Amino acid sequence: MPSAPALHPLDLDATNVVVETYDPKAMVDWAAKEFKGGLVMSSSFGAESALLIHLATRALPDIRIIFIDTGYLFSETHAFMEDLRHRFDLNLWVYRTRNDPIEYLSRAGETDPTVRRDVENCCAVNKNEPFDRAMRQLQPAAWLRGIRRQQGESRAARKPVEWSDRYQCYAISPLLNWGRREIHQYLKQHDLPYHPMFDRGFTSIGCNPLTCTRAIQPGEDPRSGRWAGMDKVECGLHLENGAGI
């Protein structure tokens, strides 16, 4: 499906004043009307991913969904992706790392498959490069993403609609103002599943080395299980020149 740019550049300040009052469904519906076939979404098929997929496919049944296979995802994530793919007949665009996963570990000097010492480089070449490649090839006018302010300080100051110089498109975050209670209510109302690992305490699910994803402890924020104990809070897809987009 070819990209279809917005009819006019958005006044982001004015747009955000309006869309901050929208619930997620209204914001997705607005984005679908504004950008039509130029709208894509990304999904990690993580803990609560069924929600945004449900909203997006109701507004645009054939929306292109970008899924990055780093080579280190949990088997449960692949199973969850296939479940939702068949359930919603998804127009899924899978982009994979250019590296052989085992060969990469050897070349990077990672001798323990359960640990990553150089998490920045691993994310850069196995996750960010495929996503950059996807955005270059698909050339969307706008991108739906599932980030939420409640997920941590790195996301607390985000706006519902932002411009990404990195991806040359608008980045739209319909779930930004929702917390876990609203998400649970929506999933229950529409009989949508959580990721299979969610009930085991995995509230944010990325790659499977213990340094990258672990279950959270009582009182921790939902993303504290990612890169636990490291000075890292984002994989990089939502960062631009060191700042969140």
Image (spheres, rainbow, N blue to C red):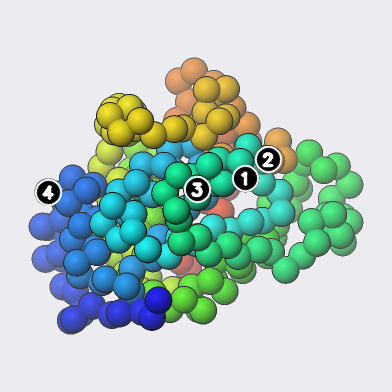
Hey, what amino acid is under mark 3? His
Between marks 1 and 3, how big is the CA–CA gap?
Answer: 12 Å
- Whether residue 179 is situated above or below residue 145 in the rendered picture: above
Between marks 2 and 4, how big is the CA–CA gap?
Answer: 38 Å
Q: Are marks 2 and 1 in contact (CB under 8 Å)?
A: yes
Residue 188 location (% of width, % of height): 33, 27
Name the element at disc 4: loop
What residue is pinned by disc 4? 21
Name the element at disc 3: helix
State which mark lies toward you, 3 or 2. Answer: 3
Q: Are marks 1 and 3 in contact (CB under 8 Å)?
A: no
Between marks 3 and 2, how big is the CA–CA gap?
Answer: 17 Å
Hey, what amino acid is under mark 2? Ser
Hey, what amino acid is under mark 4? Thr
Q: Relative to the observer, which residue lies in front, 45 or 90?
A: 90
Mark seen at residue 86: 3
Between marks 1 and 4, how big is the CA–CA gap?
Answer: 35 Å
Mark 2 nearby-residue class (10 Å; few <14, some 14–19, many ≥20): few
At a point 12% along the width and 49% down the height, the residue shown is 21
Q: Relative to the observer, which residue lies in front, 21 or 41?
A: 41
